[in-house]
Image: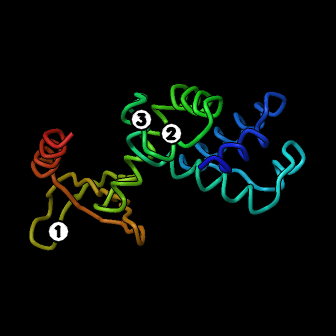
Amino acid sequence: METAQSLYLNLFGDDKIHALKELLHACVDEICGRPGPSYHRFANSVVWSRQEYEDTYKTISILLRNPACLYLIDEKMPQEYHELPEPIQQNLLTCLKARREQLTDALLKEHSKEKYETLIDFDWRLKLIMGSSKLSSLRESLLQLDLVVENRDAKRILSLELNKDELETFISAVETVA
């Protein structure tokens, strides 16, 4: 533990604290689905080996993905947090405070994808049926609804065709869930 602390203090001294802040926010960006950090991006601002970068990146990512960190309470923080030097802990807390809502949303979405199918998009079309082979003048409106759902493995489209009564029932069901 002592060697890890001295490594972090050497890497992120007072003159390189801006690089730590940038790395923390880049890791949050990655969790939120945007491009994350890369070794080449930080190679010039911090003098470290590829292995030191990978270890630091892994430690920060594990911490940020741990839901206990979102409490922002020292006692509830995971063990990895307490093994970091005090200046790094403070910068991590500052980043978590600033990006807590985004991180919470991203972690919830990630967890939801692991367990359930999640609605990510929808498309709809309204059709007016003027008649059929049985009735010459039907004049019934139908809503064609495509729901794009995603789970851990893939995306798929659920297509529904609803008349007015079915649509009202569907809306009521969705409102009770939300």
Q: How far is mark 2 from mark 1, CA to CA?
A: 71 Å
Closer to the chain start, of discs 2 and 3, is 3
Q: Residues within 10 Å of mark 2 (few under 14, many from 20)?
A: few
Mark nearest the camera among 1 and 3 is: 3
Relative vertical location of residue 123 with respect to residue 159 in this rendering, above or below: above
- Image position of 54 (left or right of 83): right
The residue located at (66%, 43%) in the rendering is: 5
Residue type marked 1: Ser
- Image position of 164 (left or right of 86): left
Q: Secondary structure at mark 3?
A: helix
Q: Residues within 10 Å of mark 1 (few under 14, many from 20)?
A: few
Compare residues 141 and 51 and report the one nearer the observer: 51
Q: How far is mark 2 from mark 3, CA to CA?
A: 15 Å
The tally of labels here is: 3
Q: Secondary structure at mark 2?
A: helix
Q: Quadrant of residue 101?
A: top left
Which residue matches tag 1?
Answer: 132
Which residue matches tag 2?
Answer: 82
